[in-house]
């Protein structure tokens, strides 16, 4: 859907991108991950035609963006600007309404849309009349996401959308955004330098070194031995452990229920884990308790299967299990 073909971008003597190519398939959330200054924001600005490449071509739905009308191009793209970028003199309602107003939507339709989007990103309607300075960082970033979604564009470009939020709220925002993305199935390019964010959100991760693409694949892809030193160092030794937080127990458990001959009360030494728990938390519990076999339970406390260390080793890193549907 979005294709960057052999892009070089120079700012004076600085080569921000050097013969850089990347494909973003439709409906996929691709995370662009890399250190500060490697050219991530440059990629986003090029797709949005805020800047033009020194050489190379960019296509959206097989159309060269050079030949597209700028207004039409931007109409199809929601853009979350690095460090929020809300208009300070507009209130929340007006910020979110920016593009629909440009598109001359009737005001009552915009009104409904703003309410819908505020609910979608988990903000109360009471925030409608607040100005950006009256919002917390996390609230501001949510408004930024709502504004990008306002005119329902098929493409979202998000430049560190959750960057300035504290870790706890960031995780909550990421979960909300993940839920929204599963619902709306946009084509998303999300820029970050946070490895855990990339693991949590990415269907695909593109890892950059300055000016270049270093590696591309689904999150499980990067535990392969063949990955080069730069990629391994950037992701860190704990990458496989971080990967576990992406999976829930139900992704890798054994669904066979061993019949309990007793009175229904489990042995006190048996660890029970909810099937929705993430594998990383489950593993922490198993280590803390020194227990290898866990019973997996559903919301009604029914035992639905079991789960062992071996299941993690055998199934968690197999690639397909880690590729989100
Ligand atoms: N307008 C500009 N003029 C000159 N150099 C620029 C300009 N914009 C970016 N650069 C340079 O291009 C390179 C890539 O910048 P870019 O903003 O794409 O990095 P980034 O990966 O988004 O970094 P960060 O994670 O810090 O946001 C950097 O070396 C930067 O200094
Ligand atoms: Mg940047």
Image: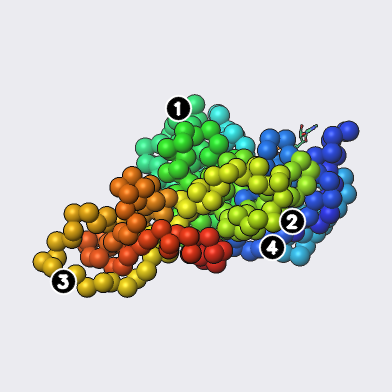
Bin the neighbour count of mark 4 within 10 Å (Cα to Cα): few under 14, some 14-19, many 20 and up.
Answer: some
**Compared with residue 265, is residue 288 higher up or lower down, i.e. above or below?**
above
* Secondary-structure class at tag 1: helix
Q: Which residue is mark 3?
A: 261
Looking at the image, is mark 4 or mark 1 earlier in the sequence? 4
User: Which residue in the structure is indicated by mark 2?
Assistant: 22
Kindly check if marks 2 and 3 are in contact, taking CB atoms under 8 A apart as contact.
no
Pointer 4 with pointer 1, Cβ within 8 A: no
Residue 134 is tagged as 1
User: Nearer the observer, disc 4 or disc 1?
Assistant: 4
CA separation in Å, label 2 and label 4: 11 Å
The residue that disc 4 covers is: 1
Assign a secondary structure to mark 3: loop
Q: CA distance from mark 3 to mark 4?
A: 56 Å
Between residues 41 and 184, which one lies in front from this camera angle? 41
Q: Position of residue 323 (x, y in %)?
A: 55, 63
> Between residues 103 and 4, which one lies in front from this camera angle?
4
Task: Find the distance from the CA under tag 3 to the CA under tag 1.
Answer: 60 Å
Residue at (31, 59) in percent of width and height = 294
């Amino acid at each position: 859907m979005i294709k960057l073909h052999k892009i070089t971008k120079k700012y004076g003597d600085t080569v921000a991108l050097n013969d850089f190519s990347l494909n973003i398939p439709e409906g996929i959330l691709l995370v662009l991950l890399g250190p500060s200054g490697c050219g991530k924001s440059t990629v986003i600005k090029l797709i949005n035609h805020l800047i033009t490449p020194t050489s190379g071509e960019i296509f959206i739905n097989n159309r060269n963006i050079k030949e597209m009308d700028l207004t039409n191009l931007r109409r199809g793209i929601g853009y979350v600007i690095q460090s929020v970028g809300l208009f300070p003199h507009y209130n929340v309602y007006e910020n979110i309404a920016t593009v629909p107003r440009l598109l001359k939507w009737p005001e009552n339709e915009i009104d409904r849309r703003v309410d819908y989007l505020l609910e979608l990103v988990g903000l109360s309607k009471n925030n409608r009349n607040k100005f950006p300075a009256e919002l917390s960082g996390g609230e501001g970033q949510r408004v930024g996401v709502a504004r990008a979604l306002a005119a329902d564009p098929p493409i979202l470009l998000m430049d560190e959308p959750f960057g300035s939020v504290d870790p706890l709220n960031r995780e909550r925002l990421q979960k909300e955004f993940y839920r929204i993305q599963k619902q709306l199935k946009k084509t998303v390019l999300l820029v970050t330098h946070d490895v855990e964010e990339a693991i949590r959100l990415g269907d695909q991760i593109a890892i950059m070194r300055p000016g270049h693409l270093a590696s591309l694949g689904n999150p499980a892809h990067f535990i392969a031995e063949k990955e080069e030193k730069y990629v391994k160092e950037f992701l860190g030794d704990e990458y496989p452990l971080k990967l576990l937080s992406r999976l829930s127990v139900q992704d890798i458990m054994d669904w066979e229920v061993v019949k309990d001959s007793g009175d229904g009360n489990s042995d006190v030494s048996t660890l029970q884990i909810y099937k929705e728990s993430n594998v990383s938390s489950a593993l922490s519990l198993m280590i803390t308790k020194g227990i290898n076999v866990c019973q997996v339970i559903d919301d009604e406390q029914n035992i639905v299967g079991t789960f062992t260390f071996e299941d993690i080793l055998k199934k968690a890193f197999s690639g397909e299990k880690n590729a989100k549907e």
